[in-house]
Amino acid sequence: MRTRASGRTVGGLRSLSLQAPAVTLLLIWMLVPLGMTLWFSFQRYNLLMPGMERFAGWENYEYLLTDPALWSSMATTLVLVGSVLAISVIGGTLLAVLYQQDFFGQGVARVLAISPFFIMPTVSALVWKNMMMHPVNGVLAWFSGLFGLPAVDWFSNYPLLSIIIIVAWQWLPFALLILLTAMQSLDDDQVEAARMDGAGPLAVFFFITLPHLKRAISVVIMIQMIFLLTIFAEIYVTTSGGPGLATTNLAYLIYIRALLEFDVGGASAGGVIAIILANIVAIFLIRMVARNLDD
């Protein structure tokens, strides 16, 4: 027993010594930027005013919380995230059911449907801005001309909707990929039995297919939510947060504070607020996924 206990102790110390470098590096990688962000958030530190740095206390937070731009950017962030998630989940579910059916060219169709996810956000935004939504040379303007309708200047008249369309086009294939993979494990015998009992396509979808995809949908929502909270490239390339603050989300507001106004203290305070918001969302999502896994 002593030998076993000693061996267990030595093995535990050995495993800890092997894990320590990776864990230490990970902690440094996470804690140092977080600590610096917290430190600067309590400082009055503007790069345009060197030598005037001082401890500001809660001034940066008070200024942000009373700034209408913060609440506008948070509302824009929630609308953007919620809209893209709705389009991705609903569209991805319907497309997964469609692409699960047997038809000619099924493999090629699946590859083409998933391919937009592998396009870089900057390239995707440029394609939509200059080739699809351009009011003069865009494909949508050409289609409008075919029906005698005036061309729409999307980024001026519908800026937030334009961003939602671009981001949803990019993330819909990801939802399709996850949900289509989940569809592969659906028991065909269960579906055939339901059809033999007289269940129609809608009944099969709502009572068999949709409950089967419940866990996969939760995973899609959790993963996409993490990335959608930090959407930046699409906004930067197309609208630059405008007109006004119409497409300025929280990530772009922090960019404006840090790299356009050179207000490091205010930008750091905004980063802390973004971290708090992201953690609240993460806690909610983790509980939702855990509940689905328990079910």
Image (cartoon, helix red, strand yellow):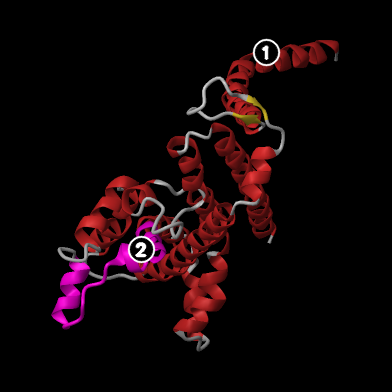
Tell me if 56 is positioned left or right of 196 in this view.
Answer: right
Q: Closest to the observer: 57 or 239?
A: 57
Mark sitting earlier along the chain (2/1): 1
| Quadrant housing residue 68 | bottom right
Indicate the quadrant containing the N terminus: top left, top right, bottom left or bottom right.
top right
Q: Is residue 33 visible?
A: yes
Residue depicted at 46% across the width and 53% down the height: 248
Residue depicted at 85% across the width and 11% down the height: 2
Query: In what element is the residue under mark 2?
Result: helix
Q: Closest to the observer: 254 or 113?
A: 254
Tell me if 99 is positioned left or right of 150 in this view.
Answer: right
- Expressed as whole percent of the image width and height from the top left, the position of residue 251 reads 50, 46
Q: Closest to the observer: 15 or 86?
A: 86
- Expressed as whole percent of the image width and height from the top left, the position of residue 46 reads 53, 30
The stretch of residues the image draws in magenta is 139-168
- Expressed as whole percent of the image width and height from the top left, the position of residue 74 reads 56, 55
- Expressed as whole percent of the image width and height from the top left, the position of residue 81 reads 50, 58
Q: Mark 2 and mark 1 in contact? Answer it, CB < 8 Å.
A: no
Amino acid residing under circle 2: Ser
Indicate the quadrant containing the C terminus: top left, top right, bottom left or bottom right.
bottom right
Query: In what element is the residue under mark 1?
Result: helix
Disc 2/disc 1 C-alpha distance (Å): 55 Å
Q: Which mark is residue 162?
A: 2
Q: Residues within 10 Å of mark 1 (few under 14, many from 20)?
A: few
Amino acid residing under circle 1: Arg
Residue that numbered label 1 is attached to: 14
Residue depicted at 63% across the width and 39% down the height: 272
Q: Main secondary structure of the magenta part?
A: helix
Magenta-colored stretch includes residue 165: yes
Q: Is residue 120 visible?
A: no
Tell me if 152 is positioned left or right of 65 in this view.
Answer: left
